[in-house]
Each structure stands twice: as structure tokens, then as C-alpha cells.
Amino acid sequence: MGESPSRSADARTGGSGVTTSHARPAGAVASAGILTGTPLPTGPEFEPGPGMGGGGALPRRRTFGAERAFRGLSVAAGTMVLVIIIAIAIFLIAKAVPALRANQVNFFTAKEWFANEGRFGIAALAFGTVLTAVIALLVAVPVALGIALYLSHYAPRRIATTLGFLIDLLAAVPSVVFGLWGREVFIDPVNDFAAWLNRYFGWIPFFDSEGPYGRSIMLGSLVLAIMVLPIITSLSREVFAQTPKANEEAALALGATKWETIRTAVLPYGRPGVVAAVMLGLGRALGETIALAMTLGATFGISFNLIGSGGNSIAANIANGFGEASDLGRGALIASGLVLFAITLVVNMTARAIIYRRREFTEVAA
Amino acid sequence: MAKRIEAVGVTAYYGSFKAIEDINLAVEPKTVTALIGPSGCGKSTFLRSINRMHEVLPGARVDGKLTIDDQDIYDPDVDVTAVRRTIGMVFQRPNPFPTMSIFDNVVAGLRLNGVKKKSILAEAAERALRSANLWDEVKDRLGKPGAGLSGGQQQRLCIARTIAVEPQVVLMDEPCSALDPISTLAIEDLMFKLKDRYTIIIVTHNMQQAARVSDRTAFFSIDRTGDPGRLIEYDATQKIFSNPGVKKTEDYITGRFG
Amino acid sequence: MTTTTLAPTATALRGRRLPKWAPIAIAALALALAAALVHGAGLGGWVLTLTVGALLYLTGLYAVATAVEGRRAARNRTWSALIHSAFVLAVLPLSSVIWTLVSKGAERLDGTFFGTSMNNIGPRDATGGAYHAIVGTLQQVGIAALISVPLGILAAIYIVEYGRGRFANTIRFFVDVMTGIPSIVAGLFVLAFWVLIVSPYVNDGRPGYSGFAAALALSVLMLPTVVRSTEEMLRLVPAPLREGAYALGVPKWKTILRIVLPTALPGIVTGVMLSIARAAGETAPVLLVAGGTAAINFNPFEHNQSSLALFVYSQATDSSKYAPARAWTAALTLVALVLVLTIAAKLLARRNRLGR
């Protein structure tokens, strides 16, 4: 895009231009410049006149000027992104290492979190983080894809635009609001549901809890599911809506039913986009802090019991424990944050890698 | 395998806009019929109403009677998908499924119909690709993406995909308009060959093409923009191009209009 | 070439179809059966009845449609029903969120709430407000925008206009990756980098919690969003526009500033507003690095600050019986702020000339 004129100017013919910022004529000067490395004296008669496009030799490229400065600025801004990512890793490590040194138990296998006393482990927290995120996605993804298909292929156009707009707005609602709603409102039906589950399905280990129910993994995961739902929906709806009409018509003309058209033309075309949307949802779910801090029971233990009061996650623990943390405690929390950073980094990079690889197939196609 | 198509008083709408009005014509089996006319005259709309692809667009509907061997295509009890399986369609721009290989593209219609056996699929794919004059060019790379082919090959792939389900009528909506002359020639050759087995109806802007490939030609036109398109003349291609019965047809064919 | 008939039913266009009333009848039957089942066995209430009814409807529909219309049509019907029910399922909780937000938030929607802070408000005081938090949010988000917007736009210009080869691709990749950084990690980063290491030098060795630190964390979160949306918009600027300028001898940087950026501006503004809306709702980083306070602090560079999102969090976890009302009203205010920004951004995007 936008081939630049400076591209040709970049192809310099010699070593000239290194030493001077003067605009000089090309031609004879260049060869002399190569040999001597010094500029020939340039008189005022060589300066390009004010008549823009006027006769005379072509002016030389400026070695230092607005173009360079602007370019440098933009390069610096681009580099800044890399610098920030690296700085995040460095500073988190710098603060985490002293705390990890002072830790008296194995950081990766211990379940307890007495950070101020120097005994803390990530096992229970990491488990809780992954468990809540996975349950949330298991609940949210099918529903989100259903709504996305409804909006892109089933709903009448006017309803689809209005609802799509509303879903986009819901994606913008801050997580603290969802946390508040989960803690104050949603907790009641979830508790009823938990009691019911325990009564009839208590023989399944997931639902084996006599109570108290309150803030549980189920509550946290469901709130999380409701939060990632608009994100996944709105991304996949966009992808589905971009399916080339020609491909859908090709399927229809082969005698496909509506669902078969979706299966043959829409879903395969949208797959990379859907994978990206789900991965982004997963990243969001893994890193979600405040909603989980408000809806999980903040206990330290590894248990598949979904309905009993309990549950925790790395991010929620940072928010909950930060207030009472000593210097050592803060270091421990930063160490746990480093683990979270690493997890989300891996998830995100995998997602991107998948997208880039899948894109090849569809882009050759397009 | 081929069937007779008959239209009686067919009128098609896009919402409140009437695109074509009162079209009456009959297409005999195993012939090539060309629909010609200026842009916007409704020939594509008519073509798409034959296999009920017209109604895919929101607000679009069709009045009148369209029959295939005396079965009403628009009977409320008729299964739309069966209509489209019987009357295949090739579109203006080649539209292979971008995520599928060449092989998967050809057998897509069969898979939809529940054919699962590898051997049957492979046999059908080869037969369809041979019929579409594409087999020799792609037999070594059936697993590659269909969209990696050239435009002309893609269009022949789409034709192969259409005839793989063994329809009885094949509709072609300006199948060569996006192709270079050599690919166009290849497709025209193919039409000659296919006409032994299928009834073919083709919309084209290219009058030489209509004259070359078709047995009968229907000329559509509109009076003014916004008016519905009408069938002006329908006759043997020979007659339309040498001695048209209507002045308007003659004007169009000699290039004085449109 | 042999021609075996592969499509056996190709000649029969007519298929048996379910009458229009059949799905409704199946639904009624399924509901009745579910009600009898659930209440007869005393398993639960109306929620369970509806759930069981829906499941019975889906299986019943599939069975009947298979028998009458065949498997393909039955699949089509069942999937269609499933897709519609997914929609209903999602609307329920989301409308509950909106409803409670409005009904509970209206309770404290008064002058005191917007005019006072939480300074000297004890657990038994029904008054108190979020003035300090609103000030904090506006200042932090404003500073964050001042940092991230120029930086983000310049980075996008580098990626689109100057970037070639490996380095540019690397940066693009990491911008993508950076969008996925959890907000709490951004908060920890600024905590480690600014609050605990840099600011003690100017703060007599004490950690310097401040609104500015929160702004730093928010700008880390905003930056990738700004870069991505600007990048997308710059790519939409048609090449002939640039080439036209180059052909007139306009230098590249001037072309970018005078022609490319103004053309892409509405889209860029949309992206910036969306990122601001997102940053305004962030709680975790503010909690970590601004510290939170009950009093009004107009100076973002010194001493603790609060923010609206943090205010919601602290009130929600407060044990005073008046705290929830304050939390809901603050949540309503926050959502209103975020939604106004988002809606304005989306409306602007619709008027965008470069729109897709």
C-alpha cells in the first residue's frame, strides 16, 4: 500500500549524502563524492530555486529533515510496544524473585497463601483460574455462536441490527458492574439451583455439597460466562456476516437447507475468526479480576465441587489480598501475576498463531 | 435426464419493485437457450426464479406459474431444496467454497445428499470433472484449495460441482463475464458437450456467445429504468440474429440500443 | 461415461411437509408433558418445567420431522430451534443486569451523590457520594488518553506506512498479544515499575500511589486498542489518494499528516473513544496503583485517588447497609458514562466515509 517516492530516493548511488545536509545536484557530484567521501563545494547556484518543478538538476535527498524526524518518531512509537511488553516481564520478575527466594514452600505445588509469613503457592489459584475460565467458556461459547448465527442469518434485518448494537453495548459494560450484579442479584437463583442440583445430583462429585452455597465456583463461572458472551457473540457475528454471499448461494443452489448452507459455507469460512473470538474470550476470562473477586468464595484448595461456597483465581486473589499485603506479600502477589501473565501470553500467542496459519488457506482462496 | 421448463405469466418482485412482468416461454429438453438483453432487463431475475434462488433475497417473491415437466416449481408442497437439486446453477463469478479442496468442492452437493462412501464420491468427482473438461488439469492436485485455480478453471470447477449432483437443468448466469477469452472458449465448448444430457439456460451479455452456443434465444428489454423487464421476442437463435421479428430486437442486436 | 442416477428422488419435487401448526402442537404437548413429569414427581418448579419442556420440544420436533420430512429437513428445523433458544437464553440474564442496574441505581441518584465525597462518612450514614471518584476517573482516563493516543497513532503509522519486513511484523504480532494482557497484570506492572521503584526517588522513599500511576496502567491497556483500530483505518485509506499526493511532490510525512490521517480521522476517533470507554470501566489497575481514598484529591500526581469503578467495588464489599445503594448508583453512573462514549463512537463510525 502506498508505495513511497522515498523508496527510489533510498536507493542512493554512492556514499555521498552522509556528510552534508545540503541539497545538491546529482550528476557529476555523485562520483566525486564516492571517491573522496567529501562533498564538493556547493554554491548558491546549485540550490533548487523557489520555482517548484523548475529546470536544473534534481535536488538531492535531505539526510536530515522533517521526513527523517517523523519517520524516527513513528519507529520509536512502534518500538515502544515491544519495550512495554519486555518491561512488564522484567519488572514483574524483578519484584517477584526476592519474594520467591523468601518463600518457604514450593511455589508451584503449594496450595496455601500466607504470603506475609512467607508461605505461598500458586497451585490452588492456578487451578481455580483455569477451572472458572473453562466452565465459563463451555457455557458461553455454544450460546454465543447460536446468537451470532441468529443475528447474522436468522433474524430479520432490522431486529438484527438493533440487537447487534445492544450486544456491542453489553460488551462495553465494565466488569465491576457484572460483579456487583452477580454478588447481589444473581446469587439467589444460583443458590436455589445449587440446592436443587445437590438434592437430585448430589451423587455427582461436582454437586456434592450440603451448603452453605453463597459465593461459589458456579456463581463465578456463570457470571464470567455472561461477561464473555457479548464479546464472543459480537466478534463471531461479524465473521459470519462477512461470509461471501456467492458461497452461500452456491450451497443453496446445490439444494442445501438453511442449516446445511451454514455448515458448508458459513461455519468453515468463519472458523479462524471464531477460534480467535473464543481465544480472546478465554484470555479475558483467565485475566478477569474484579468480577471474580466479588463472586468467588476466596478459599485456598483444589476441589471440583462447583456449588459449595469457595473458589479462587490468581487475579481475584491479587485484588482481594492486596490491601493487607506486606512488602513480601506484594512480591508474592506480583509473582502470581507473573504466572498469570505467562498463561495469558501463551494463550494469546497460540491464538494468533492459529489465526495466522488458517488465514493462509482462506487467503489463497479469496 | 433433461427436462422441459415452462413459464406462464411469471412476474417477479424485489419488495415493491417489479423486476419482470408476465414472462411466457417454454424451454425444450436438451437444448441451450440464451437469455439476452440490456442490463437491468430482468434476465438474471428470471433465471434465478427458475430454481427459486430469487426468493433468497429479503422481500423477493415470484407470481405466475413455472413448471418443470408439468410439476409446479412454486407449489407450496414442493421442497425448495429438491427444486434446486434438480435445477442446478452456475453463477457469474466463480464461487468455489474457499475452505474446501478441489475434491471437496466437487462432491459438496453429494455429501449434502448423504453420500458418504469414499469410492462413490471419488467416482462421481472424476466423472463430473471429466464432464467439465477439468480432470486432466487437476487430477494431480485434488487435495489443494479450489480457490487456487485460475478464474476459468474455477468456473469449470463450479460447473463440475453443479453437474456432480446430476441435475436435469443447468442455469448459467453470465458464466463467462469474469473470464478471459480462452477460458470463455473452454466453457462454450463444454456447453456443447453438456447439452446432450442437460437442458441449459444461459444469461449472457455477449451476443456472439449467444449466437455461438444457443439453439434458441430470448430477448428481454425494459422501456425505461424502473419499469419491469419484459420478454420481447423468443425464437430460434438463427432467426433472432438473422431476421428478428421485432424492431427492438433488431436495434439491440445491431448495436443501436443498449 | 456411464450415467448412474445418484440422486434417487431427483424427479419428485414434492416432499411431505409438516403442517404449520405442527411445531406449536409439539411445543404444547412437550410443555404439558414436562409439567406433568416435573410436578407429578415433585422435582422442582416452573424453571425446570420450562427446561424439560424445551428439551422435549427439541427431541419431539426432531422425531416428528424425521418421520414426515426426512432427516435433512428435521436437522434444519432442530438447529433453527436451537439457535433461536440460544438467543432467548442469553437475553434473560442480560436484561436482568440492565433492569437491576436501573431500578437499584435510581435509589441514590441525587445531588448529594454527585456533590460530596465519602470523607467522614461512617457505616451508619446514609449519605455520602462519589464526587471524588468521578474526579479521579476523569483525570486518570484523560491522562491515559493523552499518553496512549499519540503513541498509539504513531505506532500505527509506523506499522502501516513505514514498517517493512520482520520488525514491523513482530510489532504487529505483539500489539495483538498486548490486547490480551489482563488488566491486573498491567496494574502489577505499574505497581512494580512506577509505584515501588521509580516514584520512591521523588517521594522520600515511600511508594507513590497516585492517579497518575493509574493513568499509566490504563494507557498500557489502551495502547493496543488504539494501535489496532488506527491501523485498520489507515489501511482503508485508498492508495490512489496517497499516490496523488506523492505525484504532486508532497513529502511522505506531509502526505500522512495532511491527507491520510484526516481521511481516516473519524474511524480513529471511534477507536479512541471505545478504548477510553473500556479504560474508564477498569477497576483492578486502579485498585493496585491509585490506592483509593474517601476524600477528594484533585492532584493526580500526589497521594491516593479513587475512581468510579473502584468506588463500586469498595462500596459493594463494604458492610454498611447503605453501601449497596451507593454501589448501584455509582455502577449506573459508570455504565451511563461508558455507554455514552460507546454509542457516540458507534454513531460516528456509521458516518465514517471509509466504513466497510
Image (cartoon, coloured by chain):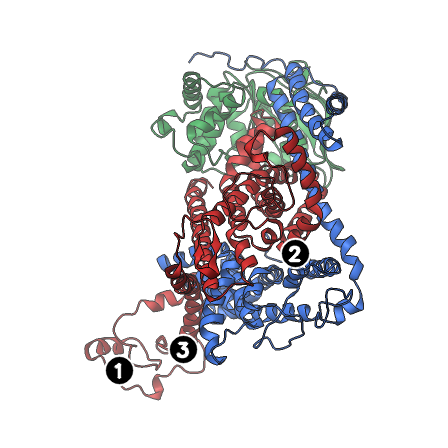
Chain colours: A red, B green, C blue
Quick one: quadrant of the N terminus of chain A?
Answer: bottom left
Horizontal relation, residue C100 to residue C248: left or right: right
Horizontal relation, residue A161 to residue C238: left or right: right
Between the C-alphas of marks 3 and 2, the distance is 39 Å
Letter of the chain that mark 3 sits on in the rendering: A
Give the structural element (helix, strand or loop) at label 3. Answer: loop
Residue A217 showing in the rendered view: yes
Residue B39 showing in the rendered view: no
The residue drawn where x is 60% and y is 69% is C140
The residue drawn where x is 67% and y is 73% is C295
The residue at which mark 1 appears reads as A39
Between the C-alphas of marks 1 and 2, the distance is 56 Å
Residue A144: percent from left, percent from top:
60, 40
| Mark number displayed over residue B197 | none
Letter of the chain that mark 2 sits on in the rendering: C
The amino acid marked with disc number 1 is Pro
- Could you say which quadrant of the image residue B74 lies in? top right
Q: Residue furthest bottom?
A: A44
- Could you say which quadrant of the image residue B254 lies in? top right
Residue C131: percent from left, percent from top:
71, 70
Letter of the chain that mark 1 sits on in the rendering: A
Residue A230: percent from left, percent from top:
62, 47
Mark 1 crowdedness (10 Å alpha carbons): few <14, some 14-19, many ≥20: some
The residue at which mark 2 appears reads as C346
The residue at which mark 3 appears reads as A65
Q: Earlier in the sequence, mark 1 or mark 3?
A: 1
Residue C297 to residue C33: above or below: below
Mark 3 crowdedness (10 Å alpha carbons): few <14, some 14-19, many ≥20: few
Give the structural element (helix, strand or loop) at label 2. Answer: helix
The amino acid marked with disc number 2 is Lys
Tell us which disc is closer to us: 1 or 2: 2
